[in-house]
Amino acid sequence: QVQLAESGGGLVQAGGSLRLSCVASGNFRTLDFMGWYRQAPGKQRDLVATITRGGITYYADFVKGRFTIAVDDAKTFSLQMNNLLPEDTAGYYCYVDATADDYTRDKSWGQGTQVTVSS
């Protein structure tokens, strides 16, 4: 099964930048669909951005023009976050839909990394 580990969260002032990374480990053939989601306390988990193995991206309206999702290598993808706003404060979670060694689907979530933006 795919295991995911996020890094790069932290505390930043409004207008600042952070770069989140998600590293996949375990037995899999390819990461076919990758995404970042976020969840603030007491709120639902929202989709932030997604990318396919072929490079097709999707962004939620509230991050368009500020965040960029990218595939860094066969096991790593990232989320560059610029011009951060206090309302971007949340736990950020990476997600993958992978092809396992036996060609079945393997869907996994990371444990999350906290992003806090001060005003």
Image (tube, rainbow, N blue to C red):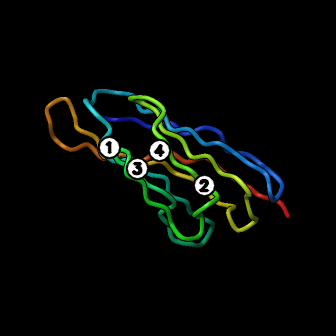
- The residue shown at (32%, 43%) is 54
Q: Hey, what amino acid is under mark 4?
A: Gly
Is the residue under label 1 in contact with that under label 2 (CB below 8 Å)?
no
Residue 2: give x, y in percent of width and height: 34, 35
Give the residue pinned by disc 4: 110
Q: How far is disc 3 from disc 1 in space, using C-alphas?
A: 8 Å
Q: How far is disc 4 from disc 3 in space, using C-alphas?
A: 16 Å
Q: Hey, what amino acid is under mark 1?
A: Gly
Q: How far is disc 4 from disc 1 in space, using C-alphas?
A: 22 Å
Q: Earlier in the sequence, mark 2 or mark 1?
A: 1
Residue 33: give x, y in percent of width and height: 33, 47
Give the residue pinned by disc 2: 67
Q: Is residue 91 left or right of residue 28?
A: right
Q: How far is disc 3 from disc 2 in space, using C-alphas?
A: 13 Å
Residue 46: give x, y in percent of width and height: 50, 66
Give the residue pinned by disc 3: 51
- The residue shown at (55%, 48%) is 112
